[in-house]
Image (cartoon, helix red, strand yellow):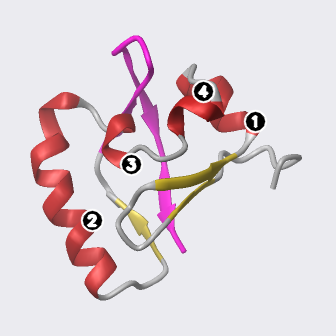
Amino acid sequence: VEASPAGVIVVDEHCRILLVNRQIETWFQYPRTELVGQFIEVLVPDSIRPQHVDLRNGYMAAPVDRPIGSGRDLHARRRDGTEFPCDVSLH
């Protein structure tokens, strides 16, 4: 996981972050010690954060491997609040 060129985030059943790899630290500009224990929404733009909680709760109730936001422009939120385009897959 640490050597992967892809960013990897592992969450628990409540969507609290358990593990991130080095790539996530670089992209999001957070040290892993600051991310572990936070809800995944810390990385979601403020404008969509409220609806994301509903979406993640739905996924956790019936998890399926899938790409997220197919055909949509997805963005993530860095520590400083800036946003950047991203692709997300759930496994």
User: What is the magenta range?
Assistant: 73-91
Give the Cα distance between marks 2 and 4: 22 Å
Q: Which residue is mark 4?
A: 27
Report the residue marked by disc 1: 22
Cα distance, mark 1 to mark 3? 17 Å
Q: Are marks 1 and 4 in contact (CB under 8 Å)?
A: no
Asked whether residue 33 appears in the rendered view, the answer is yes
* Residue at disc 3, secondary structure: helix
Residues at marks 4 and 3, CA–CA distance in whole angstroms = 15 Å
Locate residue 7: give its quadrant: top right
Question: Around disc 1, counting alpha carbons within 10 Å, would you say few (fewer than 14), some (14 to 19), or many (20 or more)?
Answer: some
Q: Find out whether the residues at labels 2 and 3 contact each other: C-beta distance under 8 Å.
A: yes
Q: Is residue 37 left or right of residue 81?
A: right
- In the picture, which quadrant includes the C terminus? bottom right
| Amino acid on which the number 3 mark rests in the picture | Ile
Q: Tell me which amino acid carries mark 1.
A: Arg
- Across and down, in percent, residue 35 comes to 52, 37
